[in-house]
Image (cartoon, helix red, strand yellow):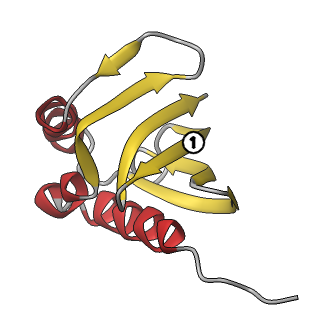
Amino acid sequence: MSMVANPNIDIAQKQLDAYNTQDLDTYVSFFAEDCIVSGLNGRPTETCRDAIRARYTKAFAQFPQNKAHLKSRITVGSTVVDHEKVARAPGGEEFEIIAIYSFRDGLIARVDFAK
């Protein structure tokens, strides 16, 4: 059985790393210009890279110590699914989330979150 590297896994990890360091420019660079962000089976909350930038500008300001710890990751085709535990601050609010990333042309084209 041969293992073929999946570049989408690398992109998923790099965007998670940028999220955790709150490097906004690097973080949004992994998303397509017309990327859609949505709750699972819900209406889109963001429909472009600029809207993602605005969302995370606010989130990073509100939660400067926010970190997401990757619990597991699976990939099928051009989809990467991350199970994460998010902590807003040391000793602060924590929750688990599933992020389902769909890729197009080497960028994240859609993210659906289940919480």
Is residue 8 shown above or below 77? below
Extreme-right residue of the structure? 1
Identify the residue at horizontal 45%, vertical 37% (top origin).
111
Identify the residue at horizontal 55%, vertical 61% (top origin).
69
Callout 1: helix, strand or loop? strand
Image coordinates for residue 41, horizontal then vertical, percent = 59, 15
Q: In the displayed structure, does residue 111 sit left or right of residue 99? A: left
Q: In the displayed structure, does residue 75 sit left or right of residue 107? A: right
Residue closer to the observer: 29 or 32? 32
Is residue 83 shown above or below 62? below
Residue 100 occupies quadrant: top right
Image coordinates for residue 82, horizontal then vertical, percent = 61, 53
Extreme-top residue of the structure? 43
Residue closer to the observer: 44 or 4? 4
Image quadrant where one finds the C terminus: top right
Identify the residue at horizontal 65%, vertical 57% (top origin).
77
Identify the residue at horizontal 49%, vertical 37% (top origin).
93
Image coordinates for residue 57, horizontal then vertical, percent = 13, 40
Residue 34 occupies quadrant: top left
Pointer 1: residues within 10 angstroms few (<14), some, or many (20+)? many
Image quadrant where one finds the N terminus: bottom right
Question: So how many labels did they put on this image?
Answer: 1
Image coordinates for residue 58, horizontal then vertical, percent = 16, 33
Residue 95 occupies quadrant: top right
Q: In the displayed structure, does residue 115 sit left or right of residue 62? A: right
Q: Give amino acid for label 1.
A: Ile
Location of mark 1 (residue)? 100
